[in-house]
Image (cartoon, rainbow, N blue to C red):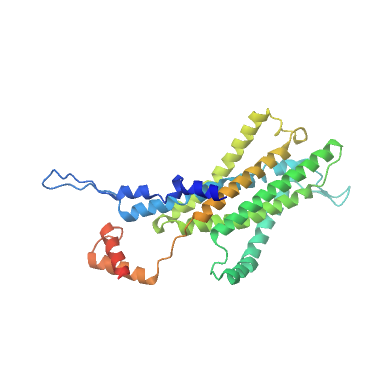
Amino acid sequence: MHLIRYFFSLSFFGCKNRFLDKAAIVDADLTSAHPAVAAGPTLTEVEEVKMVVKLLPIWSTCILFWTVYSQMNTFTIEQASRMSRRVGGGGGFVVPAGSMAVFLYLAILLFTSLNERLLVPLARRATGRREGLASLQRVGAGLALSTIAMVAAALVEKKRRRDASGGAAISAFWLVPQLFLVGASEAFGYVGQLEFFIREAPERMKSMSTGLFLTTLSMGFYLSSALVAAVGAATGGAWVRDNLDDGRLDLFYWMLAVLGVFNFVGFLCFASRHEYKREAPAAAVTAITQAVELTNQPEEDAVMVAVAVNVIDV
């Protein structure tokens, strides 16, 4: 683990993006009597870009989370269609395969309520922080639960195939554990990701940060399609088939579980090095306001920022 952290410390995302500071260097033609200074980005704009770039490592680890979630709307429904969905004996009601997703949404509602009413107050007392659980802690819990869900899905699919080969169909309610685990992971992961991208983004780029969060969802579904295509090409269609009884969907779930473990390790490395954005204290806000009034410059001007920092230091 220490070697992995050292590797990431030397990587593009571990250098705190100091190379971007060069963008604020102003070039001037010193040979001219009146050197024209080319307009360039201000220090504030450069810092905002650095803040956005700092979000990208965590962003990359959130993609696989939605890849796992997409399985609940695709292969899990296909599994349910090949399982016994009758409730109440031979003359009972047959639950539609697509309706099994209701357990996913019930889990989201349940764990979201438990999170806010039980876990957050307990974490607030234990840590002394107002928010209780930090946003990255929520994301980490979501990633861990989604990986466990794929392990459960692989075990259930193996049992389903074994019974199907003997001419029996197990109950579709065997799918409830994986649906509940994915629902619990979304209750943690979705809230944590949204909170993280909004709070850590620059003040003037909140809308863009929300869009950055939503791209993880779309990229996750694209990655799911890419993995299915890649697995189909690599195995000659032996794992994923139209008839699940002839395929090995359980191996596909195991593959996602292994990818989830590696993704979680990468997330831990990035999260351990992430520095949360500090909230500006009231004294700093007052000093910056005074600097703006004294210099009569726009807020993002580099001169104003320097003056404001000096006022705060004094």
- Numbered marks: total: 0
Please tell me whether residue 236 is drawn above or below residue 117 in the rendered image. above
Image spot of residue 74 (x, y percent): 67, 42
| Most distant residue in the top direction | 236
* Left/right of residue 21 with respect to residue 37 in the rendered view: right
* Left/right of residue 83 with respect to residue 143 in the rendered view: right
| Most distant residue in the left direction | 33
Residue drawn at 61 percent across, 51 percent down: 143
Q: Is residue 271 visible?
A: yes
Q: Nearer the viewer, residue 96 or 136?
A: 136
Residue drawn at 54 percent across, 67 percent down: 131
Q: Nearer the viewer, residue 234 or 222?
A: 234
Image spot of residue 175 (x, y percent): 75, 48
Q: Is residue 80 visible?
A: no
Please tell me whether residue 143 is drawn above or below residue 288 in the rendered image. above
| Most distant residue in the right direction | 90
In the figure, residue 297 lies in which quadrant? bottom left
* Left/right of residue 211 with respect to residue 139 in the rendered view: left
Image spot of residue 280 (x, y percent): 40, 66
Image spot of residue 209 (x, y percent): 46, 53
In the figure, residue 290 lies in which quadrant? bottom left
Please tell me whether residue 227 is drawn above or below residue 152 in the rendered image. above
* Left/right of residue 41 with respect to residue 266 in the rendered view: left
Quarter in which the C terminus is drawn: bottom left
Residue drawn at 73 percent across, 35 percent down: 248
